[in-house]
Amino acid sequence: MAVFRLFLLLLCVLPGLLQAGEVQVQGVRLWQSPERVRVVFDLDGKPDYRLFTLKNPHRLVIDLQAARLQGALKLPKNDWVQGLRHGRRGQRGLRLVLDLRQAVRPKSFVLPPQQQYPHRLVLDLETGSQTADVPAQPVRKQSVPENASGREVLIAVDAGHGGEDAGAMGARGTKEKQVTLAIARELVRQIEQEPGMRAFLVRTGDYYIPLKKRYQLARQRGADLFISIHADAFYNRKVKGSSVFVLSPKGASSEAARWLARKENDADLIGGVRLDEKDDMLATVLLDLSQSATRQASQEVAEGVLGALGKVNPLHTGHVEKANFVVLRSPDMPSILVETAFISNPKEEKRLKSPGHQKKLAQAIIKGARSYFEQRPPAGTWFAQRRKVRTHVVSRGETLSAIAQQYQISLRKLKQYNRLKNDRIAVGEVLKIPAGNG
């Protein structure tokens, strides 16, 4: 009788024991970027897997050992993936099949649990047409003849986070990655309307780009300035205000700067970057940081942007902050990181979602950048040509003080430069505009 009871007990327990070592597939997500499609499977443990491709039709097969589905897997169709199928493989195996629209070159890696994410199996599907590594050296900027009007300065606008990495979250559920992309798009739109300036988005949609590659893409395009847009959070919800950061290879300038840099630099772990990848440029970048010109240029841009932001939003501090942000490590391109506001502050979260406030933030950033290029124009640019000879034709209703304010120079300097003894000017009079403030 005792043996019979033990037999019944084993019949009840054995299926659970057999499944105890199985990895459960909990969900799937898909992100599409201009270069690749990323498919991410959430699992409750580290998977043992292999993958291979099939033709006619194109498919990607993922075989998981000792695995099973926890629920239904739904994958939205896109330009690359038509659908997802699954089935048992043997007694304990699970086969997942991605039906593809074209041949791909798959790359895969496993990420350990990080913050809200469990173990993740990451599949990057590439066609091979746009997968070349970004060159370490920037594209040489086009030279301009002396008698030409000058090339436009190029600004790279980086919307922080994206894809798997949602960034900080506001009390009302606002995601930082959405806010940063909205502000970045508005910033690019306004820059494109500025004389002598043009811009491009580093991240054009909801997908993640590794931190190192962000500034590499800017250098590849030959950007004159790199601006990274953020709206981070702090553990104290009362903390508020805009901040502007430049790179510090040594230490952070405040507790908040240290905390924010650590959070931002962890983005690769959340966004999904191979943990065994080495930052092969880091040694060179840190060595090149001894070049004070790039650091000084970044500081000057940051000061101008911070001053302009202070007129549309409270400032967290009245000075430019410093921290060792990975995304600011370009050795030869002025780079700043703008914390537009703290999304963790309910009042600032509400303003960050407002298109009107986003426009004001973009206008302030442009004002600071334009001021820098007017004072330190890159050779051969429209700003450099304009700096040589700047004139202003007086229109009806204009005053000398208003003209001085327009060009951000003092009234005293404008009068001295034009040898004016008083403030009286005539319509149609041509004034020479001196360079620089004061």
Image (tube, helix red, strand yellow):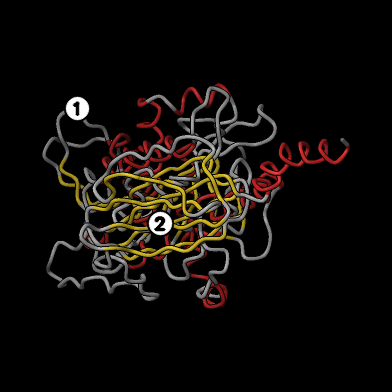
Q: Horizontal and vertical percent for residue 85?
A: 36, 45
Q: Horizontal and vertical percent for residue 223?
A: 33, 62
Residue at the spot x=69%, y=35% of the render?
A: 235
Looking at the picture, tell me which residue is in the foreground, 396 or 304: 304
Camera-near label (2 vs 1) is 2
Circle 1: element type: loop
Q: Residues within 10 Å of mark 1 (few under 14, many from 20)?
A: few
Q: In the rendered image of this protein, does residue 48 appear above or below residue 207?
A: below
Residue at the spot x=45%, y=43% of the render?
A: 28
In the picture, the disc for residue 438 is: none
Circle 2: element type: strand
Q: Horizontal and vertical percent for residue 10?
A: 76, 42
Task: Farthest residue to the right: give it.
Answer: 2
In the picture, the disc for residue 226 is: 2
Question: Are the residues flagged by discs 2 and 1 in contact, CB closer than 8 Å?
Answer: no
Read off the residue under disc 1: 397
Q: Horizontal and vertical percent for residue 136?
A: 40, 75
Q: In the rendered image of this protein, does residue 357 appear above or below residue 304?
A: above
In this rendering, does residue 438 appear at all? no
Q: Residues within 10 Å of mark 2 (few under 14, many from 20)?
A: many
Residue at the spot x=15%, y=73% of the render?
A: 145
Q: CA distance from mark 2 to mark 1?
A: 39 Å
Q: Quadrant of the N terminus?
A: top right
Q: Quadrant of residue 388?
A: bottom left
Side of 283 relative to 432 (left or right): right
